[in-house]
Amino acid sequence: MWKRVAGIIFCTGLLVAETLTAQRSHAPMVTLRQPRFNLGIRGGFNSSMFFTDHFSVGGQELEDMQNNYKVGYFGSFFCRFNLKRHHFIQPEIAYNVLQGSISIPYTLSNSEVLKETGLIKSRATVIDIPLLYGYKFVDVHPYGMAFMVGPKVGWVWEAHSKNEYTGFYQQSINEHIEPFRYSAVVGLAVNVSNIFFDFRYEVGLHNVTQRISYDASQTEEPYSQYSMAIKRRLNVLSFSVGVIF
């Protein structure tokens, strides 16, 4: 997954570099007066990474958990307020579908609380509102490159989100998730005229799980008496293509 993302970034950089070289030999580049604000749309793909800080069943910590990356998708609308000297503020609203999973191997240390290899499949539909500060360190028409950073708050659409647990003795496991998610965003945007490519990395700032419950009446003894607890953060790597007007 990371090799594929690195390849996309490398190819995009080569394309922009070749375009810049060709443009220099034919026409001069000039800095144009920016409007006070721009509107734009973007869409693309994301890869969700669930970093598990703690997962225990019956007080026993599970070991050797592996994060499995899955591709999701998103679309967003944004407004960019241009400030002086290449600075801008960019609020957005985005529709995100995030997917990922965590696998827990059936090892000797885990066999007391797992009946087979454990798997947690996660899918979340989130309405995100980032507020980004940006600085355009390349700003010569028609090319640009900007660095962005800022906070993001997201609301989890529970009706279109779910977590599936398999491989555990507990039956009908239900993970109660936090309705709001908070993260920090850092990104890089490259544009040619009004078309841009956007790379971002989001760092989750808190545990996304409130608690875990299950149906004790359908779970055999002694596992029906075990408590389950998990703490995990959600980080997201994303790539998008967009248009700014």
Image (cartoon, grey):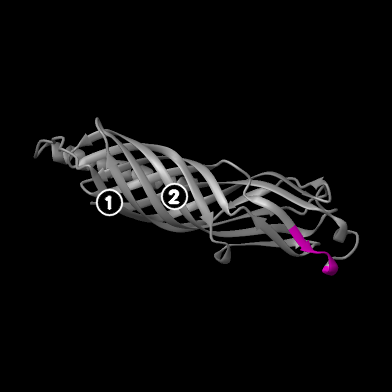
User: Of residues 48 and 1, which is closer to you in this image?
Assistant: 48
Q: Residue furthest right?
A: 221
Q: Is residue 128 left or right of residue 25?
A: right
Mark 2 residue element: strand
Mark 1 or mark 2: whose residue is earlier in sequence: 1
Q: Nearer the viewer, residue 98 or 12?
A: 98
Say whether marks 1 and 2 touch (CB < 8 Å): no
- For label 1, the SS is strand
Looking at the image, residue 154 sits to the left or right of residue 119; the answer is: left
Mark 2: few/some/many CA within 10 Å (<14, 14-19, 20+) = many
Q: State the image coordinates of residue 27 (x, y, percent, origin top left).
A: 9, 39
Q: Out of 25 and 95, give the one closest to the viewer.
A: 95
Note whether 13 is above or below 241 in the view shown. Answer: above
Residue 3: give its label.
Answer: none
Magenta stretch bounds: 213-218
**Residue kind at label 2, given as amino acid type:** Ile
Please indicate, yes or no, whether residue 175 appears anywhere in the rendered image.
yes
Across and down, in percent, residue 64 comes to 72, 45
What residue would you read off at disc 2? 129
Q: Quadrant of residue 143?
A: top left
Q: Residue at x 54, y 61 (%)?
A: 157
Q: Is 86 drawn above or below residue 53 in the view shown?
A: above
Determine the CA span between mark 1 and mark 2: 15 Å
Q: Position of residue 107 (x, y in %)?
A: 79, 51
- Residue linked to disc 1: 39
Q: Residue at x 77, y 62 (%)?
A: 214
The amino acid beneath tag 1 is Leu
Q: Is residue 1 visible?
A: no
Magenta highlight on residue 216: yes
Q: Alpha-carbon neighbours of circle 1 within 10 Å: few (<14), some, or many (≥20)?
A: some
Q: Residue 169: x, y in percent?
A: 81, 62
